[in-house]
Image (tube, rainbow, N blue to C red):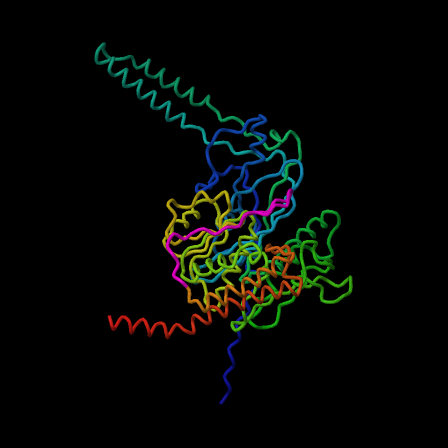
Amino acid sequence: RFPMAAEPEPPPLPLVSNILVVGLATPLAEVAAGPEAAPRSQRSFATTAADRERLRRARFAPELSASYPPDRPFAPGAGVACCFCAPSGLRISIGTALSPSFASFVLTDEAYERSYGHVLTCHVPLALDTPLAQPEAPDDAGACGDASAAGEAGAGAAASEQGAASSEALSAMTAAAAAISSAAEPPPLLTVGDLSRGAAVWAPVALCIVSRRHAPLCFKAVLLAVHTLARASLKQPLSLSLETALSHLALAVPLPPPGGPAVRFVLHPELTAPPRAAAEPAAEPESGADDSPLTLHVRAPSSSELPSSDYSAASLLDRLRPPQLLHILQVLALEWQLVIVSDDDERRVGAAELFLQWLYPLAWTQAYVPTVPDGPWLDLLKAPFPYIIGLTSRQLGQLPTPLPERLCVLRLGGDSALTGARGVWSVSGPASPLPPLPPRENGALLSSLSRLCRTAGSLKHALASDAGSPASAAARGVDEGARLAFVHFFASLLRDLPRAREAGAAAAASA
């Protein structure tokens, strides 16, 4: 007997599913805000001061410029890529380029598997001869046709009264109408340079890394490094092309197995220090040498470990009172509806991720869209099923009226960069009363959260991932303390669940 050959193990899944590049569609087509979010017909641009200001504020339609690897297409399609990489359209900058900005989004497929998009939006020079799309002109030919038809009807009536009309006169009318139609040529398209008066114009370009792992610190470091390398390549050639580095990232770096060792990789040999906005320990050199290449790592926790994320809980614990935190977790445990409102994309996604983390050992299997693009996506707010949805303050007006009975709204107000004033954080709803919690579990959790909130108030923290994972032992202790407090809370509730079911069945039988 010959031993049967073992079946080869399937290759590991890649860490990076897709690398997408989203830029402006040309000619530049202005998009409507709100539920329409499609190229809209409106008055044409003109070379006036008002239209120059309108050009600064306008949001233009995006398009998918590139997708890599070519043999691994982005499954949701180019339209979804544009919607989530630029959820409110793209805005150009006149005069000076804006600093790069980072955001992330979440997609869920039909098998309830989540993919995470990590997006860095930077600005590149835009050619001044880039045309601006003009609204579609009225159907002049149709109007002329209606007029000629009316003329023919009138001629027919006159002929019935006064006799047959001359065929030469009708031919002359038709030829005149055709001449008028051919003379109505569309006006030439204005360009960006016509409105910018020669000032430099910068176009946004969104570089997106899609992965099955949500690792905002690692992927933000990667995207910032790519941006740094791209700028350096304009001055002198790189020792390793940027295309080769990205190919290695997309094709050779595997997804870390749950509970296994961290996957470590070097993006580019010329990167010897973390990008300025990236933080330890997600992007740290392997050795203390200054010339050692930047080594990044990603790890996936096992199913027996407490869930964790790159986001610090200190911000939520500092700005929300313990009853408010418990209120939100109770809404989620009941599978009701939660809307998180913030103009900071990272703050909004980070809050949603922390709430899901605190639900452990329960798992949220309902709709989860912490970043919703403008357009038909906003119709999700009218859905009758449970969801967690993130909105900007500009999208808040799309909430249905009256609000659903089981909808809770969390507002994460932004802090003022000029005055330092702290924005208002508030929790409102749902209209339906929440069932009371058992006093034992409720009191223990509120006591733990109150202690953690006092500690968080004394720490310097930021929820957005540009501050990195908690750098101090105190901040890490706050994160771990919050996870343990909610785990003990749910474990105590679930432990008594069979007893509560028996009591309820007995009460129903006696009734």
For this rendering, which residue is in front, 377 or 240?
A: 377
**Residue at the right extreme of this rendering:** 290
Classify 447 as above or below 30.
below
Left or right: residue 337 versus residue 63 is left
Rendered location of residue 93, percent (x, y):
62, 38
Left or right: where 330 falls relative to 215: left
Check residue 73 for magenta coloring.
no
Q: Give the percent coordinates (x, y) of residue 191.
A: 58, 31
Compared to 368, does 187 lie above or below?
above
Q: Nearer the viewer, residue 469 or 474?
A: 474
Which image quarter: residue 436? bottom left
Which residue occupies 31% across, 71% down?
Answer: 504
Q: Is residue 346 left or right of residue 162?
A: right
State the extent of the magenta-drawn residues as a range: 413-436
Q: Nearer the viewer, residue 465 or 436?
A: 436
In x, y percent, where is residue 383? Answer: 38, 52
Please state, as top left, top right, bottom left or bottom right, where the C terminus lies in the image: bottom left
Which residue is outermost to the bottom? 1
Can you give x and y, in whole percent of width and height, for residue 394 in the image? 50, 42
* Dominant secondary-structure state across the stretch colored magenta: loop
**Compared with residue 399, is residue 186 higher up or lower down, i.e. above or below?**
above
